[in-house]
Amino acid sequence: MRIFDCTTFFEEHLMMDLRFNILNEYVQKFIDTFEPDFVFKNRPINRFYSININVEKQTSNKNQNLEKLKKKIDSIENCNLKNTSSKIVLGSGNINSQIMVIGETPGMEEEKCGMAFKGESGTLLKKMLFAINIESDKVYLTYSINFRPPGDRKPTSSEIKRYSTFLKEHISIIEPKLIVLMGSTAMEAVTGLNNKISDERGKWKEIIIKNKTIPVIITFSPSYLLRFPENKKFSWIDLKNIKQKIKDLKIKV
């Protein structure tokens, strides 16, 4: 008769030594079904290895798709926004975040570095997110339109509609569970609404991207709040609503 001792364990070094010592005379072969060389290396089994591989693969796929999207946007023709801008601003932050913040358009500082929400507006956004215990680099940041408009003017409805196709593809790549729309341009690009933002801010709505329903909230943009700081009190209400929604949806930040 042959006796095999098969066991799975995690970091229980003393327990494994005890099994060896007690059963050594009776068991012909000890089998660690997860990692045979564990006994000799004296290290814990990495049960998260496959999870890490999946995350790395997901990140790689997203980066590839974002690069394709960037090239697609940058090759747009007959666009005054692109023709007057020096650099495309796609997005920045954590591409695997479950929270996506969509602003209106890049400004001068963003155009210089090619990253979203820099300068004064970026500093304010960072403070706003920090107020609800979110670090700005833990979320994904982008814009409704990826080029700085001439004179920082508001984009026309036709421009917003044209770029909304790219934006929806952008959302489908990031796959967020919650979207924050900052400013009327973002509101119109994602929801199709062109009402006064003061009438829509603080309201939760839903959009469907690739058969997935995503909750979105409309709020003032940081650049607007810099011009009209008296409205920060309303943004604070919105931020608290966002914090509660994150809790309700059990979103990891």
Image (spheres, rainbow, N blue to C red):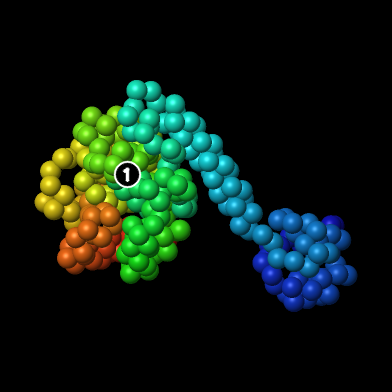
Q: Quadrant of the C terminus?
A: bottom left
Residue 62: x percent and y percent?
A: 50, 41
Residue under pointer 1: 105
How many tags in the picture?
1
Given residues 200 and 42, the one toward you in this image is: 200
Secondary structure type for disc 1: loop
Q: Residue at x 28, y 57 (%)?
A: 222
Q: Amino acid at mark 1?
A: Thr
Q: Quadrant of residue 221?
A: bottom left
Residue 168 vertical position relative to residue 95 in the rendered view, above or below: above
Location of residue 104 with respect to 230 vertically, above or below: above
Residue 126: x and y in percent read 38, 63
Q: Is residue 177 visible?
A: no
Of residue 201 and residue 80, the one placed in the foreground of this image is 80
The quadrant of the picture occupied by the N terminus is: bottom right
**What x and y, as percent, mark residue 102?**
33, 48
Could you tell me if residue 15 is visible in this image? yes
